[in-house]
Image (cartoon, grey):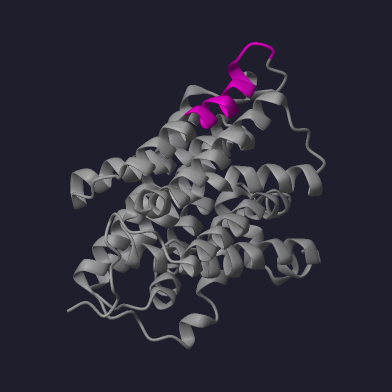
Amino acid sequence: MSAVARAPVGDAMATRDVLAAMAVVVIWGINFVAMKWGLRYFTPFQLGAVRYLFAALPLVFFLKPPRMHWRWVLLFGLFQGVGQFGFGFFALKLGMTAALASVLMQTQVFFTALFAFGILRERPGRPLVVGMAIAAVGLGCFAMNFIGPGATGTGVGGATMVGICLTLCAAASWAVSNIVSRMVQRASPGYKPLSFVVWSSLVPVLPFAALSALTDADAGRWLHWDAWAALPPVAWGAVAYLGWVATIVGYGLWTGLLTRYPANRVAPFSLGVPVVGLAAGLLVLGEVVTAWQWAGVACVVLALGCVVLGPRWARR
């Protein structure tokens, strides 16, 4: 019998789990600001390697390996780390704006629902279907800021078809990592999510380091201590946030939720990430919010309300 009770598909999420999901939304929304600061001092692949090195250290020395087959650790690390951020970083390098990437990444919700239905046979409830439809309209509003009438951004000139395809591949990889988490719960019930996230963080380090060595002209400078010593506090703070807060705390909570609820119930919460990212950009980076973006924010908030409160209303 499973050590972690799985909530029935139609039941509402517990209040503490809703709060945990919203905490992840805030953490990952602020994550975009930390990424922008980190990319001032590292290339994308270098930042990926350092991020996951920080995520693994020092906790890997204090936490026992998760009690499961190692293929789950490798699969999660490859899809959530190398896949999601590898494709995402390549997209940003080859032709994708950060703003449009943050929107397109949320298509992982639809990929997750599709994969969950095809692989796990998890059928979405009516509130989720309605919420996803509203969210799709919201994502369309975000995209219209770049490609629609009266667009004022640089999305058309800054985004290429290759960049768009790579970003969608990143979203699909994120969705697969969601499915892996659910499959782990079935194969190894009662596993510890924190240990799982920490040990799987070791997996992307070497692939990212290898990609950096192959593509970054200045990769060799990190072999000298002087390069690390010259980094300012903001660079170390960005890496620490990405590694410890966004990865360990964020994915630890996220993976824990996926052990208790169907994947297509948890994934829609990530639709709030662009909302927080937008607010963080406005307040911290001084970015301007357009009418299309405000329309998208309204739709995403409405979609989240439908997903979170819909099951409660249905039971009344």
Left or right placement of residue 129 versus residue 135 in this view? left
Residue 315 coordinates in the image, percent (x, y): 35, 54
Q: Is residue 146 magenta?
A: yes
Compared with 33, 67 (above or below) is: below
Comparing 305 with 257, the one in front is 305
Q: Quadrant of residue 148?
A: top right
Name the residue at 42% across, 47% down. Answer: 310
Q: Can you see residue 299?
A: yes
Name the residue at 45% across, 67% down. Answer: 201
Left or right placement of residue 246 versus residue 186 in this view? right
Total number of numbered labels?
Answer: 0
Q: Main secondary structure of the magenta part?
A: helix
Compared with 178, 56 (above or below) is: below
Comparing 145 with 127, the one in front is 127
Task: Please report the bounds of the magenta region as a residue range.
Answer: 137-150
Residue 90 coordinates in the image, percent (x, y): 51, 40
Q: Is residue 99 magenta?
A: no
Comparing 189 with 162, the one in front is 189
Residue 121 coordinates in the image, percent (x, y): 18, 49
Residue lying farthest top?
A: 149
